[in-house]
Image (tube, rainbow, N blue to C red):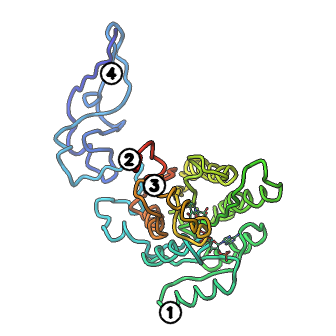
Amino acid sequence: MAMAQALVLSPPSLSTCSSANSPPSFLCKSKTHSFAHIVLYFKPRKAPKLVHYYCINPILNQNQNMSYNPRASPSSSNSSITSHESRWSLQGKTALVTGGTRGIGRAIVEELVGFGASVHTCSRNENELNKCLTEWGSLGLEVTGSVCDVSVRNQRESLIDSVSTLFDGKLNILINNVGTNIRKPMVEFTAGEFATLMGTNFESLFHLCQLSYPLLKASREGSVVFTSSVSGFVSLKNMSVHGSTKGAINQLTRNLACEWAKDNIRCNSVAPWYIKTSMVEQVLSKEDYLEEVFSRTPLRRLGDPTEVSSLVAFLCFPASSYVTGQVICVDGGMSVNGFYPIHD
Ligand SMILES: NC(=O)c1ccc[n+]([C@@H]2O[C@H](COP(=O)([O-])OP(=O)(O)OC[C@H]3O[C@@H](n4cnc5c(N)ncnc54)[C@H](OP(=O)(O)O)[C@@H]3O)[C@@H](O)[C@H]2O)c1
């Protein structure tokens, strides 16, 4: 079998590989190299064929201070001098969190603002929203809010208009958190119930992404995070429609990650199992059911909203700037549980 071979004719001089944005110091790509610096790949019995203009220099590779950034990214162009503080901070960032007055959304608002972001949130209940805004204000937290039902098209448009005005046309972070649930066998779903779940859980965030795109792009460093669910991965009783909406979110996450990468907008999802919020209070009030939940959850407990919000914050930090298109479960191990009996 013919094997490709590489021949390095001569190492380059230091001066050929020392610019700030040059390729890895040991792997220089330049059309300016003389023939003597070129790696040739050739197959036996055939004429040598030039494949790449690479040269290899192990001496340069030992110089740890040299920057190598083919098509550089992280926000600051020189990652070696990016400070720890700025990679783990949201100082100066703008964020919209939908459904921020209770549960996971509220924890996300408080997490992001705690790391320095300016946050806008929304919910349908004006009194509850105002109460939250007052509480946050008294703590000195920079949060604003709008009354908005995200399942209604023109209310979504007004929301993004407000956000655009508030943040000067630039949005770094969009957290599509709102979601609802109707539990019943799929054959019993009415057309109206189906439309409610699809409209609230999927159509709303699809449209919010469309509306937010110019703002995210203008920020030059965008992060979109969806609140999905383990129901988008595994079967849960009476949750066929809910699971379908979350499965759609998971795929939208992957598609947008690729479609918007050119604009430096990352897209990821968090997928919780049972988290202690008002949404699941009723179903978890049944002792037997709760025991079954524990038995399916390796960590043997429910999650706390802050255990979701911390992951969301990470996905917004510059520290996660190479993470995109991922759906990450926050589930105490539920989604990877095969068969681990409690009594064995
Ligand atoms: N809790 C869990 O165990 C769990 C598990 C998996 C996934 N999730 C997902 O996590 C997300 C948040 O759930 P959660 O448990 O935190 O819910 P929650 O405690 O019921 O809080 C929902 C928040 O969203 C707001 N909201 C609901 N519908 C809205 C609408 N149409 N327009 C605007 N705001 C709306 C609510 O305020 P108003 O009612 O005043 O509008 C509230 O602020 C959802 O996407 C859910 O599917 C939750």
- Whichever of callouts 3 and 1 sits on the residue coming sooner in the sequence is 1
**Marks 1 and 4: CB-CB under 8 Å?**
no
Task: Locate residue 36, reporting x and y percent.
Answer: 25, 28
Residue 317, percent across and down?
43, 65
> Which disc, if any, is residue 138?
1
Ligand number 1: quarter of image: bottom right
Secondary structure of the residue carrying numbered label 1: helix
Residue 34 visible to the viewer: yes
Give above or below for 113 relative to 79: below
Among the 4 quarters of the image, the one containing residue 225: bottom right
* Disc with the residue nearer the chain's start (4 vs 3): 4
Image height check: is 180 above or below 252?
below
Q: Secondary structure at mark 3?
A: loop
Residue under pointer 3: 297
Residue 84 is tagged as: none
Residue at the top extreme, as displayed? 45
Q: Against 196, is 110 above or below?
A: below
Identify residue type, mark 2. Pro
Of the pair 43 and 127, the residue shown nearer to us: 127
- Pick the residue in front: 249 or 286: 286
Asked if the residues shown at circle 4 and circle 3 are in contact, with their CB atoms under 8 angstroms apart, the answer is no
Name the mark nearer the viewer: 1 or 2. Answer: 1
Residue that carries the numbered disc 2 in the rendered image:
70
